[in-house]
Image (spheres, grey):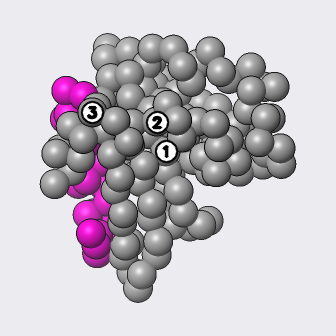
C-alpha cells in the first residue's frame, strides 16, 4: 500500500479511528525516524477527538489521553536499550489492560508482538510512505478492513 502524502496518512488515521474494533487494540508502529509513525498517531488522536497539543512521547516514553472510547496510551520505546526495559518501567499493566495502546519502536519490546492486534510498517518513499499492514489477531483483521 502507498500513502502519497501527509493527507493520505491522516485520511488512513481517520478510517482507523472509525473502526468499532479500535477500543482496546494494541497497535505496533514500525519504521525509521521520520517514517510517519507520529503523524499517523496524531491523525488518529485528532480523529478520536483529542484537542490541543499532541506531543510525541520520545522523551517522556508515554503520553496518555482520556477519551469517551477509553484511555489511549501512546508509547515510544526509541530510547530503550534492553528488551525488558518497558516491563521494568512498569508498563506491562497498561499494555495488557483496557484502552487503546499505540507503540512506536515495538522492536525494543519484542514480547509485545505476541499480544498485538495490528502491525503498521512505514517506509518513506519520495514524498509519501510505503505501508505494510499486518493483522496479528481477529481484532487486527477488523482494523485492516477499516484501512482498506
Locate residue 84, reporting x and y percent.
79, 35
Locate residue 55, reporting x and y percent.
57, 41
Q: Residue at x 63, y 36 (%)?
A: 111
Q: Quadrant of the C terminus?
A: bottom left
Between disc 3 and disc 1, whose residue precedes?
Answer: 1
Q: How many marks?
A: 3
Q: Which of the 4 quarters of the picture holds residue 51?
A: top left
Note whether residue 90 is visible. yes
Between disc 3 and disc 2, whose residue precedes?
Answer: 2
Residue, disc 2: 116
Q: Quadrant of the N terminus?
A: bottom left
Residues packed near mark 2 inside 10 Å, few (<14), some (14 to 19) or many (20 plus): many
Residues packed near mark 1 inside 10 Å, few (<14), some (14 to 19) or many (20 plus): many
Q: What secondary structure is marked by label 1?
A: strand
Q: Residue at x 54, y 19 (%)?
A: 96
Residue, disc 1: 28
Question: Does 107 appear in magenta?
Answer: no
Q: What secondary structure is marked by label 3?
A: helix
Measured along the vertical axis of the image, is residue 80 above or below residue 91? below
Note whether residue 44 is visible. no
Left or right: residue 138 versus residue 24 is: left
Labels 1 & 2 near each other (Cβ < 8 A): yes
Q: CA distance from mark 3 to mark 2?
A: 11 Å
Measured along the vertical axis of the image, is residue 128 above or below residue 88? below
Residue, disc 3: 138
- State the extent of the magenta-drawn residues as a range: 1-21
Locate residue 120, reporting x and y percent.
41, 54
Labels 3 & 2 near each other (Cβ < 8 A): no
Q: Residue at x 16, y 45 (%)?
A: 145
Amino acid at each position: 500500500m502507498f500513502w502519497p502524502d501527509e493527507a493520505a496518512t491522516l485520511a488512513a488515521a481517520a478510517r482507523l479511528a472509525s473502526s468499532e474494533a479500535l477500543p482496546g487494540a494494541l497497535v505496533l508502529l514500525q519504521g525509521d525516524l521520520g517514517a510517519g509513525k507520529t503523524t499517523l498517531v496524531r491523525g488518529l488522536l485528532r480523529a478520536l477527538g483529542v484537542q490541543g497539543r499532541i506531543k510525541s512521547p520520545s522523551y517522556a516514553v508515554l503520553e496518555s489521553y482520556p477519551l469517551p472510547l477509553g484511555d489511549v496510551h501512546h508509547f515510544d520505546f526509541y530510547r530503550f536499550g534492553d528488551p525488558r526495559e518497558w516491563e521494568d518501567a512498569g508498563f506491562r499493566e497498561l499494555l495488557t489492560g483496557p484502552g487503546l495502546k499505540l507503540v512506536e519502536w515495538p522492536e525494543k519490546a519484542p514480547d509485545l508482538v505476541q499480544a498485538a492486534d495490528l502491525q503498521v510498517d512505514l517506509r518513506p518513499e519520495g514524498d509519501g510512505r510505503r505501508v505494510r499492514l499486518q493483522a496479528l489477531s481477529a481484532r487486527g483483521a477488523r482494523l485492516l478492513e477499516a484501512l482498506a
